[in-house]
Image: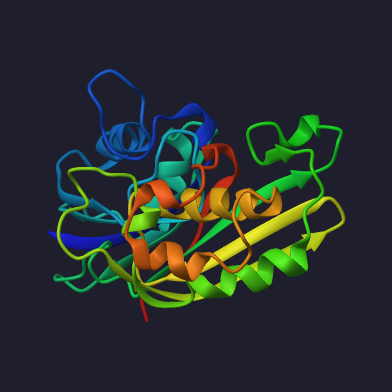
């Protein structure tokens, strides 16, 4: 069987995350249904990451073994014929037999979008957090640099049975930028814990409100205590933006 890397993009509003669940529609479920209609049997389908309900993906990678002889370029168009409008296949390519979409990933980049205005934007409903209070982007960008580096991020992780063992992650960069009323927080790391980005964003929003000091992030990391960090920001503004393998 051939090992194929498939890259998709999806609108997370319609789904309860990536992973198959018994009583909810997920991205993996509709993807597997579309793939099965084209190639029949497939094995070892692996997603690059888990994403939660309401989270979007500009780039999501899947490795899967198929025995069907369909060329990769035709598989892309065939998938787009069967996938719902909220999911699109961006590309397909054959990869080495031992390639794994999750374990071979070198880093991931997430983006969190905030519509920073006293008036909501109806075109961004479900795609960005509407935040009415003025954000000091320069101050938040400076505060966020404390996230950069290799740290134990237990304080920025929702307790979950999936997060046992090593909670150290290496954050390569974190930026907070504004374009008119749209504030974008972008973070790249070698991996992320459950709700890690949303708690980082929530902590920065708490800093903007004066509930947490701007220089407190380093100390919160050292405490290894979820209660020390800020709120968990809503899922609607979060996007898995980029997956890096090389």
Indicate the position of residue 46 as horizontal and vertical percent values: 23, 53
Q: Residue at x 44, y 62 (%)?
A: 220
Q: Is residue 61 visible?
A: no
Residue 234 shows in this picture: yes
Residue drawn 76% across and 44% down?
115
Q: Position of residue 47 (x, y in %)?
A: 29, 52
Location of the C terminus by quadrant is bottom left
Residues 111 and 67: in front is 111
Q: Is 91 positioned to the left or the right of 124 in the image?
A: left
How many badges with numbers are in the image?
0
Placement of 240 over or under 24, stated as above or below: below
- Asked which colour scheme the image uses, the reply is rainbow
Q: Nearer the viewer, residue 171 or 70?
A: 171
Residue at 27%, 44% in the rendered image: 159
Q: Is residue 234 left or right of residue 153?
A: right
User: Can you say whether 165 is above or below 99 in the image?
Assistant: above
Q: Name, please, the residue furthest toward the top.
A: 23
Residue 109 location (% of width, % of height): 49, 65
State the quadrant of the N terminus.
Answer: bottom left
Above or below residue 151? Residue 124 is above
Q: Quadrant of residue 38?
A: top left
Residue 143 in the image: state x and y as whole percent.
62, 69
């Amino acid at each position: 069987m051939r090992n194929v890397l498939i890259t998709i993009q999806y609108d997370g509003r319609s789904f309860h995350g990536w992973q198959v669940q018994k009583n909810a529609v997920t991205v993996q479920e509709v993807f597997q249904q579309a793939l099965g209609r084209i190639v029949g049997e497939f094995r070892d389908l692996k997603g690059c990451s888990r994403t939660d309900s309401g989270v979007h993906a500009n780039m999501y990678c899947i490795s899967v073994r198929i025995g069907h002889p369909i060329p990769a370029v035709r598989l892309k168009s065939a998938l787009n014929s069967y996938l719902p409008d909220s999911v699109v296949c961006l590309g397909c390519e054959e990869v080495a037999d031992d390639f794994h979409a999750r374990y071979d990933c070198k880093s991931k980049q997430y983006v969190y979008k905030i519509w920073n205005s006293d008036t909501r934007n109806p075109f961004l409903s479900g795609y960005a957090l509407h935040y009415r209070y003025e954000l000091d982007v320069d101050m938040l960008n400076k505060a966020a640099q404390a996230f950069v580096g290799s740290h134990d991020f237990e304080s920025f992780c929702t307790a979950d049975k999936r997060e046992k063992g090593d909670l150290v992650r290496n954050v390569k960069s974190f930026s907070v930028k504004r374009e008119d009323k749209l504030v974008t927080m972008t973070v790249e790391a070698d991996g992320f814990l459950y709700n890690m980005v949303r708690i980082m964003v929530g902590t920065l929003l708490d800093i903007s409100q004066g509930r947490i000091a701007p220089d407190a992030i380093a100390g919160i990391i050292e405490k290894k205590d979820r209660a020390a960090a800020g709120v968990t920001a809503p899922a609607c503004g979060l996007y898995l933006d980029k997956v890096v393998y090389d």
